[in-house]
Image: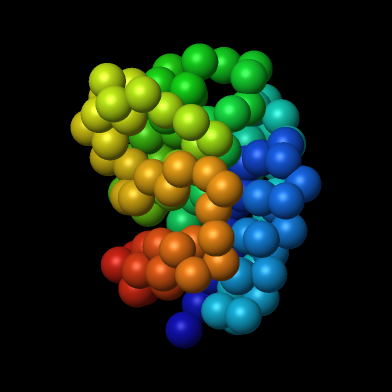
Amino acid sequence: MLPCNILVGSKTVANIHLCEEVAAELGVATIVQKRMADILLSLQEDDFNAIVFDLDIKEMEALKAIRLIRRMRPKIPLIALAKKIDKRSGGKILSEGVFPMIVAPPNKKNLSAAIGAALNKKI
């Protein structure tokens, strides 16, 4: 089996630590990027088994960022994290093929289930 890598795109320290902790328990490596440009560059250069993307990265409007990620890597499971999201925006984001959306604060159980399911879907 090939090694698994997860791209974590977030500026929030708590989200990053939680993703790293869950990934370590699942035996998965993480690559953390805090800026949208670095996230896109990583997607272009490296292979990932899943993406955890924090919608609160303010460098680009969330829906636009999701659409761009989806164009670049349409088959990779994409897990979205959000502090708060209205139903209309959430519906639009989910319609773009986001695997699950976890409204913050994410907890270990929900994130572990989402990443585990994403990896099982991909592997």
Residue at screen point 43% across, 48% down: 102
In this orientation, which residue lies closer to the viewer: 48 or 114?
114
In which image quadrant can residue 38 be found? Answer: top right
Residue at screen point 50% across, 36% down: 82
Q: Reply above or below: 48 against 90.
A: below
Can residue 61 be seen here?
yes
Residue at screen point 73% across, 58% down: 17
Residue at screen point 30% across, 67% down: 121
| Percent x, y of residue 105 | 57, 48
In this orientation, which residue lies closer to the viewer: 82 or 30?
82
In which image quadrant can residue 31 be found? Answer: bottom right
Q: Reply above or below: 75 against 91.
A: below
| Percent x, y of residue 50 | 47, 56
Number of numbered callouts drawn: 0
Q: Reply above or below: 37 against 6.
A: above
In the image, farthest residue toward the right: 13
In the image, farthest residue toward the bottom: 1
Name the side, left or right, on which 46 lies relative to 51.
right
| Percent x, y of residue 112 | 49, 69
| Percent x, y of residue 94 | 28, 36
Q: Reply above or below: 37 against 23.
A: above
Q: How is the image coloured?
A: rainbow
Give the quadrant of the C terminus: bottom left
Can residue 96 be seen here?
no
